[in-house]
Image: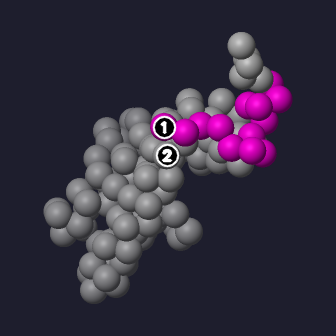
């Protein structure tokens, strides 16, 4: 919740809900992507989530707010120099993940995808 609050984008009464739900949603989408279950749908959800992360990081960078993105830290305040150096890399990482997710929307089937077993393509 600290990370979600630090972005200063959501009303304070929504922050606890998003702070608790976001990690669960991320794990579920990640599991779906790894297993290849509903690949197009999970790729779309992942792409939208990555886009939201890019917008959030760009927003705090633009507004001069120095925070950790919350990905691997607590998401709290940090020194401006450290944040300013991190933001481009965090945005680049999330844009890369966005492109990978978008690729799955375009080409959802992989040889090891469970979608191949659960929803076989008809040959005729």
- Whether residue 48 is visible, yes or no, is yes
The one of 64 and 1 positioned closer to us in this rendering: 64
Q: Which mark is residue 106?
A: 1
Q: Local crowd at mark 2 within 10 Å, few (<14), some, or many (≥20)?
A: some
Q: Which residue is drawn at 68% across and 43% down?
A: 110
Residue 88, percent across and down? 31, 73
The one of 81 and 119 positioned closer to us in this rendering: 119
Image quadrant of residue 62?
bottom left
Q: Residue at x 42, y 40 (%)?
A: 48
User: For this view, does 112 lie left or right of residue 100?
Assistant: right
Q: In which quarter of the image is the C terminus?
A: top right
Q: Which colour scheme is used?
A: one colour
The region drawn magenta spans 106-118
Residue 64, percent across and down? 18, 69
Q: Local crowd at mark 1 within 10 Å, few (<14), some, or many (≥20)?
A: few
Disc 1, SS: helix
Asked whether disc 2 touches disc 1, contact meaning CB atoms under 8 Å apart, the reply is yes
Q: Residue 86 carries which label?
A: none
Residue 25, percent across and down? 59, 40
The one of 123 and 59 positioned closer to us in this rendering: 123
By secondary structure, the bulk of the magenta-drawn segment is best described as loop
* Residue lying at the far front of the rendered structure: 124
Image quadrant of residue 32?
top right
Q: Which residue is drawn at 50% across and 37% down?
A: 105
Q: How far apart are marks 2 and 1 (CA)?
A: 5 Å
The one of 25 and 50 positioned closer to us in this rendering: 50
Q: Name the residue under label 2.
A: 103
Q: In this view, does 62 lie above or below 41?
A: below
Image quadrant of residue 29?
top right
């Amino acid at each position: 919740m600290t990370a979600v609050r630090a972005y200063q984008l959501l009303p304070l009464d929504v922050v606890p809900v998003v702070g608790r739900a976001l990690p669960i949603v991320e794990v579920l989408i990640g599991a779906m992507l790894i297993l290849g279950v509903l690949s197009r749908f999970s790729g779309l959800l992942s792409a939208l989530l990555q886009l939201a992360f890019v917008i959030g990081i760009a927003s705090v960078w633009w507004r001069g707010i120095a925070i950790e993105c919350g990905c691997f830290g607590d998401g709290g305040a940090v020194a401006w120099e450290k944040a300013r150096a991190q933001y481009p890399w965090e945005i680049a990482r999330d844009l890369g993940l966005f492109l990978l997710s978008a690729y799955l929307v375009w080409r959802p089937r992989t040889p090891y995808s469970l979608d191949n077993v659960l929803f076989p393509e008809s040959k005729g």
